[in-house]
Amino acid sequence: MSPNEALPLAVLASSLLPGLVIFVLPEQRVGLRSALNLLGAVSKLAFVALMLQGVAAGADYGFRYSVLPGIELVFKADALALLFVTLSTVLWLFTTVYAIGYLEGSPHRSRFFGFFSLCVTATVGLAMAGNLYTFFVCYELLTLSTYPLVVHRGTPQAMRGGTVYLAYTLAGGALLLTGIVWLQGLVGPIEFTYGGALAALQPPQQAQIKLVFLLLTAGVGVKAAIVPLHGWLPQAMVAPAPVSALLHAVAVVKAGAFGIVRIVYEVYGVEYAERLGLLAPLAVAAAVTILWGSLRALFQDDLKKRLAYSTVSQVSYIALGVALFGPVGTIGGLAHLVHQGIMKITLFFAAGNYAETLGLHKVSELDGVGRRMPLTTLAFSLAALGMIGLPFTAGAVSKAWLADGARAAGMGWAVWVLWASSLLNAGYFLPILWRAWLRWPPSAWPREHIAARGLRETSWLLLLPTLFTAAAVVVAGSLAAAPWSPLAWARLIAAREYGHGV
């Protein structure tokens, strides 16, 4: 096996093997469990860095294994895969540190971190999937590995939320599998290809090909929380804060959005999809989701539910970018895949800090919290302003490219959707910032964690990841023109998908 074949497997093994060992560790082996978690996260980051350097220089990384005649397990680390793999790997490191602090003293930590590692393994496997069969296998493994995390607390509310989550995601998997089997029956096995595998084949069964597109996008649209397939996401907010961060920024919803990207660009091909008239309905579905999610967020007092409906809205920016025919919209959508991740994980980290330290779960309880936890609230503020689209933040960059992409595609109505969304973003984030910074705090907090008494903030294991990701929101926005930025990598992907420089 060559190094170029071994590296994708090493990326998978760096979280899979520690996870399997963690499952059998006694609860009291805290130090060893934390060391295995961090070793896996750091080694995965090193392997991904090697592949990033190689892919930028034109190298190919991949591995394939024949399961049955006509069915192969294929992993490849192309530019698009590494955009998602890098996001997942970097944020997994921060989430691991955060989860170690958040779950300190909690029961069933070995079970939690075991499934946590399997979840990341499934996510990077999905990102590096080289064909629809491999994508489906990892897609379903992601469902099965995240369910125990959603129901981790074991309360009746957690079990109800987990049941809803499982019902939605398994139904989505069934739709996806139906579409894959139907497509393979029409044209044979499909591998992800720059420019689109179907575009090269030009199959004559256009009516069936359109129906297959509906099945495939509906299947991944469940995890991407496209309206009306989004009902599981607010219910899943019963999970602990590290799991919510994982679901929204690293794994599940991003897996759905990434699936839409793969289907449009590398199964159908964006030009072929446009000729079939498939992009306009996708753009409408994304626009409806963007506005609906923002409107629902306005009326949520529960902080995590407000953030959940914000995710429903913000993740559909990626689908909108995909549906804007042209490289500019593609760049905006792909950049937002990363930018939304770093903004949303910051928001959930901060919400977890409020809940774990002071027992705050509702927006109405946040009066004056900026005076008690100024650094956490500063991080929340930067991420929230980024979501609104404040200049020099990550959100401003991707929104500007999406708006330019809409104009270039002759879809001026999408610009108005983006403006309306930004106003609604301000409508549900600015009242939180006003409460946190400008209102007087209560005489006593609902519950002040004993470990944080006398401290200005909270545990450093909770605070440092929050501050690092908040800083990334500003760095990604201020240095978007840098050659190593997410925007620059999105331009590289768009150039390869469209076959010319951007």
Image: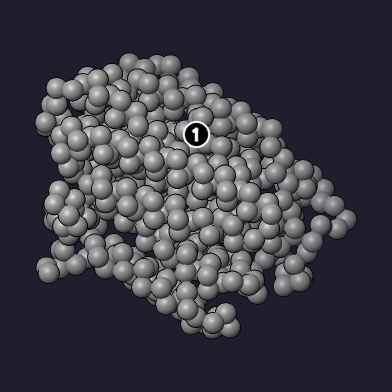
Residue 479, x across and y down, in percent? 38, 47
Name the amino acid type tagged 1.
Leu
Horizontal placement of 366 versus 160: left or right? right
Name the residue carrying label 1: 229
The front one of 393 and 89 is 89
Say if residue 392 shows up in the picture.
no
Horizontal placement of 348 versus 371: left or right? left
Residue 176, x across and y down, in percent? 35, 39
Residue name at image x 12 percent, y 69 percent: 1
Image quarter in which the C terminus is found: top left
Q: Image quarter for residue 260?
A: top left
Residue name at image x 45 percent, y 45 percent: 170
Please tell me whether residue 2 is drawn above or below residue 149 in the rendered image: below
Q: Image quarter for residue 222?
A: top left
Residue name at image x 35 percent, y 20 percent: 280
Say if residue 345 shows up in the picture.
yes
Query: Disc 1 on helix, strand or loop?
Result: loop
Horizontal placement of 184 versus 172: left or right? left
